[in-house]
Structures are given as C-alpha cells and as structure tokens.
Image (spheres, grey):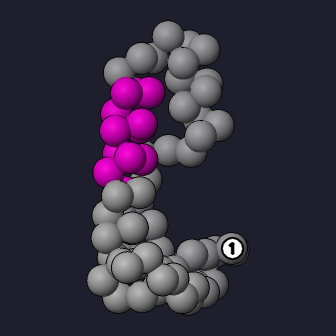
Amino acid sequence: SPTLGIEKLGTGYEAVSWFQEGKIKEVINYCRQDVELTREIYEYGREHGLIYYCPTRGVRIEVKVDWK
C-alpha cells in the first residue's frame, strides 16, 4: 500500500491460483490482510483527507478523499 508503506502478501490473481492449488491457508491470510489494509487505508484517508496509489513502479500519486 503506497499510503501505508506496507507490502501485500500477494495479488488477487495469486489468491485465485492458491485456491485452485488447494492452498487455503494462503488464501485466508491474503484475504485477512486485504481487509485489514482496506480498513487502515480508509481510516488514513478519513483522518488525513488523502490517500496514495502507484499506477506504475516508482510513481506515487496523491488522491484527495472526503470520507468524514
């Protein structure tokens, strides 16, 4: 997450592959972290009025949000 500086455990595509391979614990961990990051990004945006995203590696864009 560019906003929080936290790396995700994987991608949605990887989660699908893990599921197909029967790696259910990996899927659970991925989903749990994804939900936690989503909540933390929301809380950051609500408090600071902005979040960040990276459309390409090395580029960080500020996005203003109004989540109050």
- Residue at 45% from the left image edge and 67% from the top image edge: 1
- Residue at 64% from the left image edge and 37% from the top image edge: 13
What residue occupies the far right of the structure in this picture?
56
Q: In front: 41, or 8?
A: 41
Measuring from the top left, give residue 68's x and y in whole percent: 37, 79
Is residue 38 shown to the viewer in this render? Answer: yes
Q: Magenta residues, as a range? A: 26-37
Helix, strand or loop under label 1: loop
Asked if 21 appears above or below 38 in the picture, the reply is above
Measuring from the top left, give residue 11's x and y in whole percent: 56, 45
Asked if 11 appears above or below 53 in the picture, the reply is above
Measuring from the top left, give residue 39's x and y in whole percent: 34, 58
* Residue type at tag 1: Pro
- Residue at 42% from the left image edge and 17% from the top image edge: 24
Q: Is residue 23 left or right of residue 14?
A: left
Is residue 5 shown to the viewer in this render? Answer: no
Residue 29 belongs to the span the image colors magenta: yes
Please give the residue where the numbered disc 1 appears in the rendered image: 55
